[in-house]
Image (cartoon, rainbow, N blue to C red):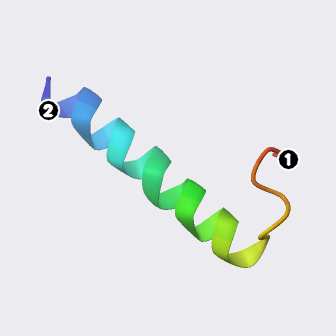
Amino acid sequence: EVVAAIGLLVQLLFAGVAAAVRPHGCLVS
């Protein structure tokens, strides 16, 4: 579904930003 694809993209983008801001905090919420 489109909604599922958008959700995955949002998660990937958020994870990428979090990784960029916190290189060692990928697994930490």
Side of 7 relative to 22 (left or right): left
Determine the residue positioned at 75% across, 53% down: 26
The amino acid pointed to by label 1 is Val
On residue 2, which mark appears? 2
2 vs 1, front mark = 1
Determine the residue positioned at 48% across, 45% down: 11
Which quadrant, please, contains the N terminus?
top left
Side of 12 relative to 29 (left or right): left
The amino acid pointed to by label 2 is Val
Disc on the earlier residue, 2 or 1: 2
Side of 27 relative to 16 (left or right): right
SS category of the residue bearing label 1:
loop
Instruction: Give the class, few, some or many, for how many residues have Cα within 10 Å of label 1's Cα (few <14, many ≥20).
Output: few
Determine the residue positioned at 45% across, 60% down: 13
Q: Which of 1 and 19 is in front in this view?
A: 19
How far across and down, in percent of the image, does residue 9 sit?
Answer: 34, 48
Q: Which of 12 and 10 is in front in this view?
A: 12
Determine the residue positioned at 24% across, 35% down: 5
Determine whether 13 is above or below 10 in the image. below
How far across and down, in percent of the image, does residue 16 sit?
Answer: 54, 64
Q: In the displayed image of the protein, which residue is found farthest to the left?
A: 2
The residue where tag 1 is placed is 28
How far across and down, in percent of the image, does residue 12 sit?
Answer: 45, 51
Q: In the displayed image of the protein, which residue is found farthest to the front?
A: 24
